[in-house]
Amino acid sequence: MSSTLLNFIYLLSLVCWVGSIIFFSFFVAPVVFKNLEREKAGELIGIIFPRYYKIGYVCGALVLMVLLLTGIETAGLKGCAWGIMMLGTLCAGLAVNPKAKIIKEKLREASESDKPELEARFKTLHSLSVKLNAAVLFAGLWLLWLSSINFKL
């Protein structure tokens, strides 16, 4: 495969991944929660999340493919940044989000005495999700920085 095509796949994947995080976190989620009642906003975000994480899985796989094809041993810090991004995305998408979804469903059917505990558990998972999202974003910005060091127009 040509190095130009590999560079294109790498940059497009990385920019789509980081861009989706920025767009969702700073534009979509705030607008949804500002304009819809909390329950409906949560439902809509819950529908978006699986697709949001799929973007990370696909883009992460493509970035890894390029790193492997170009020699992962030379990737160094890029591999580290990619690893943080992928680990954060996988943890949030495959562990935290499904648990939060189950708790949300239980909350709808819970008695008033059970709600405080479930709400506390959901809040903890939400906080973890936000932290993982921030870690993925900052690692992605770091990876973009590392990728731009020798970049020439």
Image (spheres, helix red, strand yellow):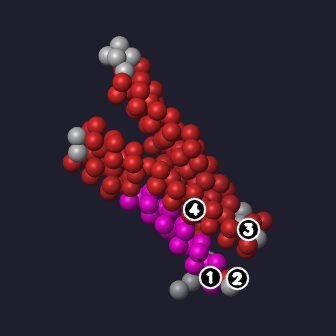
Measure the C-alpha gap from mark 4 to mark 2.
19 Å
- Vertical relation: 63 (above or below) 103: below
Neighbours of disc 1 within 10 Å: few (<14), some (14-19), many (20+): few
Residue matched to label 3: 68
Q: State the extent of the magenta-drawn residues as a range.
A: 4-23
Measure the C-alpha gap from mark 2 to mark 1.
7 Å
Return the mark for residue 58: 4
- Vertical relation: 125 (above or below) 114: below
Q: Earlier in the sequence, mark 4 or mark 3?
A: 4
- Vertical relation: 44 (above or below) 64: above
Measure the C-alpha gap from mark 4 to mark 3.
15 Å
Residue type, label 3: Leu
Residue type, label 2: Met
Q: Position of residue 115 (x, y in %)?
A: 36, 20
Residue matched to label 1: 5
Residue matched to label 2: 1
Snapshot quadrant of residue 78: bottom right
Quadrant of the rendering where the N terminus is positioned: bottom right
* Residue 138 appears in the figure: no
Mark 4 in CB contact with mark 2 (< 8 angstroms):
no
Snapshot quadrant of residue 4: bottom right
Mark 2 in CB contact with mark 1 (< 8 angstroms):
yes
Instruction: Describe the element under mark 3 as helix, strand or loop.
Output: helix
Measure the C-alpha gap from mark 4 to mark 1.
17 Å
Is 35 left or right of 51, judged from the image as shown?
left
Is 88 left or right of 78, judged from the image as shown?
left
Q: Mark 2 or mark 3: which is in front?
A: 2
Q: Earlier in the sequence, mark 1 or mark 3?
A: 1
